[in-house]
Image (tube, coloured by chain):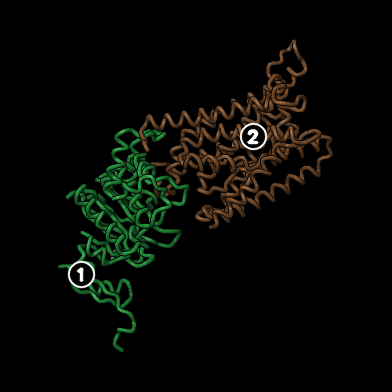
Amino acid sequence: MKPAFAVNNLSYAYGSQFVLRDLSFSVSQGEMFIVIGPNGAGKTTLIKLMIGIAKIQSGQIEILQSPLEDYSQKRLAQVSAYVPQGLPVGFPFTVEETVLLGRAPHQKVLGLASQNDLEMAQQAMTFTEVSHLARRKLDQLSGGEQQRVLIARALCQQPQVILLDEPTASLDLSHQIRIMDLMEKLKIEKGVTVVMVSHDVNLAAMYGDQLLLLKAGEIVRMGPPHAVLNFETLEETYNCKLLVDNSPLGNLPRVTLVPRKFLKP
Amino acid sequence: MNLNLEHNITRLLWISLILLGVLLIAFILGLSIGPTQSGLRSALSALFATRESDPVLYSIVWRIRLPRVLLATIVGATLSLGGLVFQALLRNPLAEPFILGVSGGSAIGAIIGILLGLSRFPGICFTSFLGSLGTLALILIMSTGKSILRKDALLLSGVMVNAFCSAIIMFLISITQDARLHNIIFWLMGDLSASDLPQVVILGAILIPCFAIVFVFSHAMNLLMMGKDMALTMGINIKAVTLILLVVTSFMVSATVSFSGLVGFVGLVIPHLLRLVLGPDHRLLVPASLFGGGAYLVLCDLLARTLPQQGEMPAGVITALIGAPLFIILLKKSRK
């Protein structure tokens, strides 16, 4: 499998403070790649570097076998899309208009929508199950619905890779699973490479093909869920008491937090 | 709802046409109504006065009122568009050139230009532009990073910049031992009376390309509504777009300030009303703000000319009387 991303010796610092130190890894095309790690591990910085929001200070990133710096901004937006953490704060468009904004990288400067653009938006809304909300204003929707609209907008860009920063944060259980199922469907049906930052190690175990465990800007471990999510590694990385066993769903690791009152003295 | 291309363009044309009609009506009212006639019929007949039938009226309508109404149209359009652009860039419905202090900075520049004895164009225009860039830089430095999105932080820096500008303006006025003192003060309140046709035409000729530049970036402003990171990953060069729009807008505002002084709140009232009716699509809002803002200031100026029993008051008084309460309502609403 050709790599969707190849990251080599990537380092990043705010002032003299290193956020990422000498990372090297690659992401295969068509896989779900989930970055996990404690707060301050540098997960968001990493994903922002990979999509070109933050400027590379040292090291290299290749997207689809071409160096990131060889892409024009518009060209990059035609092959990759990003769903940031949090929701937009500007004056709210309707759902349909928001999704249609995703066509911008394929349009001329005024962004007038062609018939093809409209069909793309329809398909994207159907795919993320927000068609019935088309005429509602974005700020009138629940967090989970807004997240699905923003993903539909990203799909409108027809990306080969999509990057998401904690898409399930602050969502209830049913919306979490809905978003994750959606990303898996995207991976399987459209062959899109999904790169995601997540705080939820169990969701990462259930959906990730490859996991990257970061701590303090360095790779602790990388590989399939079983290789990364083991008891010693996790306890040391997160610095808390954990239980890791097999999920009742099958051959998947399951991580359980252990509160202090359950610890034997 | 149908969102296809032809529908979009048709909607744009219709809205522009309707608002252009409103502007035209305002324009005709502005031309025909004045203290010399009473009643609508005699007012409208003033438009048809010829040099032979009534040379005095002819001269009033075409030599005095026409430049004034034209200036009001241009200034109103510019300030309204300026408000729209600042609101889009700062994602804040309360941003407006006057409230942010950009107009105040232009005024300092303009007064310095007046005191140096420069001509209105290009001299005072240029010093006024420098003044607006200075305050703009000050505001951006004071509310860097995330705090610029917080309404209170932005307003607070605006209030402070305005207070500072007022202090400098008062200082400059107090050291001026000049008969034109009254003129400066009147001009500060937003005065549209001192205009002659060739200068207004020059102003229009400078500003129309600016309007075109802003329209070109109207869809980029739409994408900015999704926040910086999403706009960036949808192919928008945020730094370039922001810089171009800020500089062009400051230029437009300072050019109008050097002609008409401080007319406040036009950029707050008009974009807010239009956004309520038309939604947040800037491809519609840019032309709509131009026509709507022009019509609004022509009407405000008409009120300013006709309300007082004797003489007249600056148009800025009317716009502030309407705009300031709306601002308070908006602020209260946004806190909820």
Q: Report the front residue among A5 and A116.
A: A116
| Chain A colour as displayed | green
Q: Report the front residue among B334 and A74.
A: B334
> Looking at the picture, how far across and down is residue B117, in whole percent?
75, 32
Task: Specify the amino acid type for callout 2.
Answer: Leu
Where disc 1 sits, the SS reads: strand
B86 above or below A6?
Answer: above
**Residue closest to the far top:** B52
Q: Chain of mark 1?
A: A
| Chain B colour as displayed | brown
Q: Which mark is residue A253?
A: 1
Image check: A50 left or right of B204?
left
Q: Which mark is residue B297?
A: 2
CA separation in Å, label 2 and label 1? 68 Å
Number of other residues with Cα within 10 Å of mark 2, as a class: few under 14, some 14 to 19, many 20 or more: many
> Looking at the picture, how far across and down is residue A25, in whole percent?
25, 57
Picture quadrant of residue A183: bottom left
* Residue pictured at 74% horizontal, 35% vertical: B307
Q: Which mark is residue B40?
A: none
Image check: B259 left or right of A102?
right
Picture quadrant of residue A205: bottom left
> Looking at the picture, how far across and down is residue B143, in whole percent?
56, 53
